[in-house]
Amino acid sequence: MIDLEAAREEVRRRSAPPGRGEEIPLGDALGRALSEPLRADRDDPPFDRALMDGYAVRSEDLPDAPRTLRVTGEVSAGDAALPAVAPGCAVRINTGAPIPPGADAVARIEETRGSVEVLRAIARGADVLPRGALARKGDLVVEGTITPEKLAVLASIGAHRVKVAPRLRVAVLATGSELEEDPSAHAIRNSNGPMLCALLAGHDVVDLGVARDEPRELAAALRRGLECDALVTTGGVSKGLKDLVRGSLESLGVRVVFHGVALQPGKPTLFGEHPKGFVFSLPGNPVAALVCCDLFVLPHLSARSGLSFEGALARLEGRLVAPVRGSPDRTRLLPALLRRGELRPLPWRGSADLYTASRGNSYVILPPDGDFAAGDAVSCLVPARHLLSVWA
Ligand code: AMP
Ligand code: MG
């Protein structure tokens, strides 16, 4: 059995983004990772630009202001023809317009009277944003994950199409002969499949539904899943007679990297690799499947999508409001609610207790044998999807 940190390290080492990228329209690129940093295609602003409404003036005309200047024209944002400003003259100018030749400053409208007396001396460059002040042509201006702000930068440098890390195809398969849609008395509904599909939203999810614990049916479903960049299964990966997933994967050419993690919940977790991609076989118990998806699957897919492994699951600190007990030989992750620094462990009833886990936003980390008292500051893990709720 491998310990949790070593298991995460094995996954992290196999989470490099693929070299290939895909080119997509900018409008579809929110949240995607740029394959390479991009540069400004020209100076920004591309001309000396007025920052205020007022008059374009020559600062040298105005050391002894107030002074009356002759207004010889006007210029607005988008104008191409620029009336020159001669000595003793001014041109009416609007915010965003290019500073016309001869002028070197803007006298704000509120610093003038009539048409036009400039009331105060105006310093050279006043209320002018010089060409290239924000970016020089060729400067690196945007990289990494495309946020709305970066999308605006991309629009401003004319990147109408962008090269991003490709979306991953991820297959989801729930296994177990007890899984029925309209369950009879001895059967249960499949909650892991819909949960995983939801957790993986953002990737191209291929929902393979349910396979029973029958060798041929299972192998056929796994074979389909192995066509994808990653396959996530639940159930059938412990030591029971009907736990056929590991053997079936191996017969399909999967090499097991680890099987068994010193973790509660989630001990039976298996991680494997094969020429086309990776397999995560998570336990069937719903909370174990949830925790292991957060610990292993989402960080892996995030990193392979060009985003960050660590960013998928933040480590924060909180002050416990109740005591908690570790397990003797395994790291325990306890569903909890972290709000404004206060960490409330949820009174959950084991790894099938999805009801309690569904009210949490984090997991308290309890090292083997680690017992903590109310008031202790402890680490917890917060999935990226819950980060906002920690402060709200
Ligand atoms: P297993 O890992 O196959 O031994 O399953 C452990 C427990 O999780 C059993 O009680 C299963 O019935 C339950 N279980 C397995 N798969 C699912 C699923 N897809 N949805 C809900 N519960 C499941
Ligand atoms: Mg089973």
Image (spheres, rainbow, N blue to C red):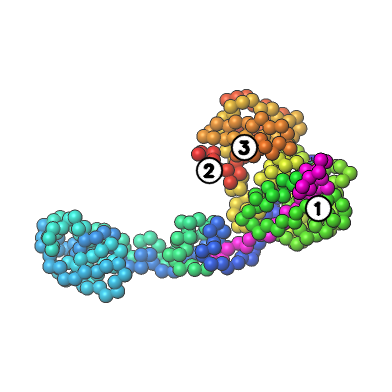
1 or 3: tag closer to the N-terminus: 1
Q: In the image, what residue occupies the spot 76% across and 58% down? A: 225
331 is higher (above) or lower (below) than 230: above
Q: Amino acid at mark 2?
A: Leu
Q: Residue furthest right?
A: 241
Taking 126 as reference, is 367 left or right?
Answer: right
What range is drawn magenta here?
A: 162-188
Q: In the rendered image, is residue 279 in sight?
A: no
Residue 359 is labelled as 3
* Residue that mark 1 sits on: 211
* Residue that mark 2 sits on: 388
Residue 165 is labelled as none
Disc 1 to disc 2, how far (Cα)? 36 Å
Disc 1 to disc 3, how far (Cα)? 29 Å
Callout 2: SS: helix
Tell me where residue 350 appears, x and y as whole percent: 73, 34
